Amino acid sequence: MTFVITSTCCSDASCIPVCPVQCIRPRPEDPDFHTAEQLYIDPSICIDCAACQEECPVAAIYPEFELPEELEGYLEVNADYFADSPIEESAAPDPIKHTLPAGHATLRVAVVGSGPAGCYAVDELSQIAGVTVSVYDRLPTPFGLVRAGVAPDHPDTKQITGLFGRVLSRPSVRCFFNVEIGRDLSLEELRSSHHAVIWAGGASSDRALGVPGEDLDGCVSAREFVAWYNGHPDQAGRVFDLSGEQVVVVGNGNVALDVARVLVQPVDALRRTDMADAAIEALADHGVRDVVITARRGPEHAACTSGELAELARVPGVVVRAESDEVAALGDSPRKAKLLAESGDRSRDDAERGVTFRFGLTPVSIEDDGTGRVAAVTYRRADGETETIPASLVVKAIGYRGLPVPGLPFDEDSGRFVHQEGRVVDGATGSVVTGVYCSGWIKRGATGTIGTNRVDARETVASLLADLAAGVLPEPTGDADEIATLVDARVPQVVDRNAWNRIDRAERDAGAASAVRRPRAKLTAIDALLAAARQ
Ligand code: NAP
């Protein structure tokens, strides 16, 4: 018997230290850790102790005999990972136990952003005796993209909020939500009242295609669309025209597949989720029949993971098509291309909706229907010809991009900070900005899964502690209560941990009261969130 890791794996690697026989790979120090789709268990070594399953924050690990039918293939997927590279040494990694350096009894850190990057940084810091952490978020709600990015039909992935909620509830952690740094408090005020600031604000903008027509009505970024259906207050009031039959999604990463799945999925499945009510209603009555997912390279470079692809192929009433001549040439293909080839071979006569994968198409312009709305996307094909694909909505799923932070150096080309192991650096001079660190997408770009942020945060916190030991961090002025008093004066509606718990309870109660017992019914307007916080 063996345990099996499945597609929900968040790769935060919390299962690795608890495995007594070290049969899980890749480990954070292995070369393929950042490129592997997930972690895998070697079935020939697993001793069936269940320690990994208990530790997994997203319920991605099953004993083989309890694998749900749709995940049975993962037994083979796990074994395949070790086919060419059997485990040779299985010594447990040294547990990382941070302590404050000698001579330092206390450390005060501000973490900006309460998404996965921020929460994992708080987790690392708040396990150290003598450290206090204040967490800031501009929204009244924590958890960043776990709340506003993870697809509503991925409830297992959202279970990571259980871990993050426990982290934010630790006595050494203080939450200041509904407080925007740069608006309500300045970065300098944060710096002077803490030994260090970790910026974990994520990537809140989009990469641009840079083609004519990109600004037409009906050409939107996946970030906006995803935030809308997830009830992010910034996008909650948006109206997307879903009356047309064909939507084009540019890019074929996991975000593209999330968008496609949400558009073609039967709405009854979505009604049971925490999707924003307005989005459920819009999707209940839309005209979309086909989603075309286009990529500029071939299927062997598809940016989505196999798990997302397999999931799309399982959506009831949906046929997934791939141009067979485009995938046939792959021969001994990797799993994704094989899945695509199989999808292309399959036709479902009863299919109500379809998703078509196209490859080798580089966008050159978005076409106008004559009224300022999109009508089609024109591409240059690999053979040099152009091809135009009609579209009533164009969703650009080509990646997220970070925004500059006033007062800090920023690399506009990459849309993120330049950094040295998490220390923010001025790219022009190479000098380190003392006491300012970064973690997550603003540090490494919009890549990786939720759990990648754990390893990332570890590196940043290790740098911060090394700087403290080296004596480079200035002693903060004032005490922790002073900054709290300042926040109270400027933001009377600051949302602390208890206030967030009240919002959380109100949303869960409303969800439980619905006929289909939803996990939560999200409040999507700032006023409504703040009212629930005060209840
Ligand atoms: P992504 O994985 O980086 O995919 C971006 C896609 O856009 C690629 O297909 C890329 O093609 C294409 N692209 C980029 N620039 C383009 C251009 N100028 N013209 C045409 N195509 C262009 O980004 P993402 O889908 O936004 O995902 C971000 C991260 O979140 C990823 O690490 C992803 O795995 C993660 N995520 C995970 C899940 C999950 O685990 N379920 C869900 C959502 C997101 P090229 O390859 O040719 O550049």
Image: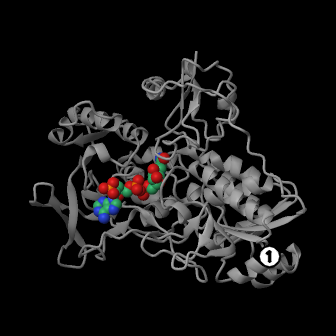
Q: Position of residue 131 (x, y in %)?
A: 83, 60
Asked whether, in this view, residue 329 is left or right of residue 8, the answer is left
Relative height, residue 94 to residue 215 (above, below): above
Does any portion of residue 202 appear in the rendered image?
Answer: no
In which quadrant of the rendered view does residue 322 lie?
Answer: top left
The N terminus appears in which quarter of the rendering?
top right
Q: Looking at the image, is 267 positioned above or below residue 9?
A: below
Mark 1, other Cα within 10 Å: few <14 / some 14–19 / many ≥20: some
Q: Type of residue at label 1?
A: Pro
Closest to the observer, 109 or 57: 109
Q: Where does label 1 land, which residue? A: 474
- Out of 167 and 331, give the one closest to the viewer: 331
Q: Is residue 117 left or right of residue 188?
A: left
Q: How is the image coloured?
A: one colour
Residue 84 picture location, percent across and down: 42, 26
The x, y position of residue 241, in whole percent, is: 33, 66
Q: Quadrant of ligand 1?
A: bottom left
**Residue drawn 21% across and 39% down?**
327
Local SS, label 1: loop
Q: Is 347 on the left or on the right of 476, as rendered?
A: left
The x, y position of residue 344, in whole percent, is 22, 36
